[in-house]
Image (spheres, rainbow, N blue to C red):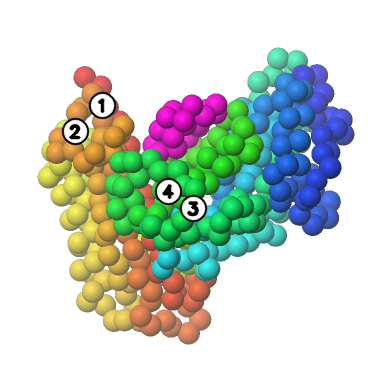
Amino acid sequence: MSRWVRWFSTVSPFRAEATMAPRLSHSFQVFRDVSPLRQLRRQLLLSDRTVGLVPTMGALHEGHLSLIRQAASENTDIFVSIFVNPTQFGVNEDLDSYPRTWDSDVEKLEKLNREFASLRDKSSVESSSDVPGQITAIFAPTSQVMYPSLPPSSEIDGPGSFVTITPLASKLEGASRPVFFRGVATVCTKLFNIVTPDRVYFGQKDIQQTVIIRRMVQDFHIGTEVKIGSTVREDSGLALSSRNAYLGTRRRTVGLVLFRALKAAEEAFMSGKNSRADILGAANDVAQKTLSEQEVLSPSDRVLFEVDYISLADPDTLDEIDEVNSSKGAILSGAVKMFPLEQSIPGEDCGLGDGKVPVRLIDNLILKPRTP
């Protein structure tokens, strides 16, 4: 029996006295406060166990679960944070309407732990490298816990203790959402300080976020390894996002315009084209054609949207480039704002919010270096 299997076949001794969320019978501990979580983390450290942190804002989907599976393959213990961070929402953004699905989130995490336990039970080979870890803790703090000295501010010049990573945070998404990456960098710094994970896990879908987090960890000498998981998509190609719950059938279908535009740009690059005009021209043609097709439909049939940006950028600096260096590649990314439905049909699936909530979709593809 492997060392990991022996660990998990016994009752865990790591039951720090804690201020925890109300719980029934979970396979993991749920923490609301910092001090008891740190007690558990110290016990794990002294026992030579490793911690992988998966930061989330809840509304868990298969993209999150794939990151947790990756973390379980590389660590003995997984901490999942669930916190809708107010400082990454602008003043007029959708903080209040952001989906909060605690019960279903917990159910999904319990199911994952059963999956991991089943795999451990099946493993009897001492040298097995396939024995997964377990979800040990959920950190679900309040805003008061995460921002103890001042109420969190979403104002651009609002008061507070913030982490800023410039100029990376002012490009692409940051140009449209000026406080977004300040909030992301700040809350991630806090989470990394609280949990001190060996590894942290983020998805490629939020590619600018991953570049910023890597830079932050490097610049502030934070002792954690940043791991990036592949974008998880629906069968149609739509990148999974918690905000997809707002789309409904009609906007979900038309929302594929971003993925199709990026794929057209990728195909142009793969065919041998390197110039910005050729690569982004292919993407813009798809977006414009789709919008024109929608505009001639009736309000009860169409979906209107606005392309915020489609970018061709250097993979390290996120600077826009005029020509792709074939030996280095580039990042294709974009954002589209899906407007609320103008009219709906009785019985139509309009998604969470009855089609009245605008939905911002982001996506990206990596243009990998060409082999000479």
Residue type at numbered disc 1: Lys
Visible residue check, residue 294: yes
Residue 86: x and y, percent?
52, 58
Tag 1 residue = 328
Which quarter of the image is occupied by the C terminus?
top left
221 drawn magenta = yes
Residue under the point 49% across and 53% down: 160
Q: Tag 1 or tag 3, which sits nearer the N-term?
A: 3
State whether residue 267 appears in this view: no
Residue type (three-letter) at the residue carrying disc 4: Arg
The residue at which mark 2 appears reads as 324
Q: Position of residue 108 (x, y in %)?
A: 67, 51
Closer to the chain start, of discs 4 and 1, is 4
Q: Which contiguous range is marked in magenta? A: 211-228
Mark 4 lies on residue = 182
Marks 4/3 in contact by CB < 8 Å: the verdict is: no
Pointer 2 with pointer 1, Cβ within 8 A: yes
Mark 2–mark 1 Cα distance, whole angstroms, equals 8 Å
Local secondary structure at mark 2: loop
Q: Residue furthest top?
A: 127
